[in-house]
Amino acid sequence: MESNLFIDTDIILDIVLDRKEFFDDSAAIFQKFETGEVFLYTSPSIIINAQYVGQKQIAKSKCRAVMNYLLNYFIILEADLSVLKQAYQSKFSDVEDAIQDYTATKDSVINFFITRNIKDFKPGENILPVATPAQFLKLFKQNP
């Protein structure tokens, strides 16, 4: 199964902050990139948000170093004016989530939106299948 995954802020923070409860599943997603099984995408605002949140919880220099390293894993997708307008006119309750969803779907490349914040992605709002790292890994194992 060739997969292009859009990675949300919380997944990056699992790695940066070494969140014990979530680290293994999130790290497994990055390992799938290392073995060429998936491609990882994100947006500049997710990178900025992860840096902002991360540096409040660990040393700024450590956060910056880890974030700089993780940039090697990503293809960065940009939001444009049409994405922003779609997001503000959408049914999403959270505009930031809408911007990420529409950024991910803009070029029709992404297969899954990977986040642990699945409760904010309600049927009828988002276009992409949304999965936690654990859910995606289970699906990937069933359909290699």
Image: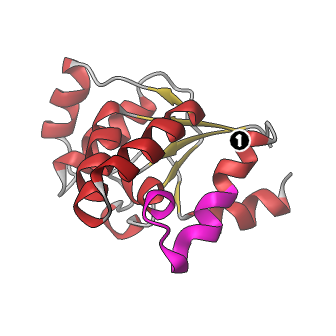
Is residue 23 inside the magenta stretch? yes
Give coordinates of residue 142: x percent, y percent: 84, 63
Residue at position x 76%, y 37% in the image:
2
Camera-nearest residue between 118 and 78: 78
Residue at position x 29%, y 25% in the image:
79
Q: How is the image coloured?
A: secondary structure
Q: The N terminus appears in which quarter of the rendering?
A: top right
Question: What number of labels is visible?
Answer: 1
Give coordinates of residue 17: x percent, y percent: 43, 64
Residue at position x 28%, y 66% in the image:
57
* Above or below for 7 versus 79: below
Residue at position x 64%, y 69% in the image:
24
Q: Main secondary structure of the magenta part?
A: helix
- Circle 1 packing at 10 Å, graded few (<14), some (14-19), many (20+), is some
* Above or below for 24 versus 9: below
Give coordinates of residue 122: x percent, y percent: 35, 62
* Above or below for 86 versus 34: above
Left or right: 111 in relation to 119: right
Give coordinates of residue 91: x percent, y percent: 20, 50
The amino acid beneath tag 1 is: Phe
Q: Which residue is mark 1?
A: 33
Left or right: 31 in relation to 17: right
Q: Which region of the structure is painted magenta? A: 14-28
In this view, the residue farthest toward the bottom is 21
Is residue 50 inside the magenta stretch? no
Q: Secondary structure at mark 1?
A: helix
Camera-nearest residue between 96 and 88: 96
Camera-nearest residue between 74 and 101: 74
Left or right: 19 in relation to 111: left
Left or right: 38 in relation to 110: right
Camera-nearest residue between 91 and 41: 41
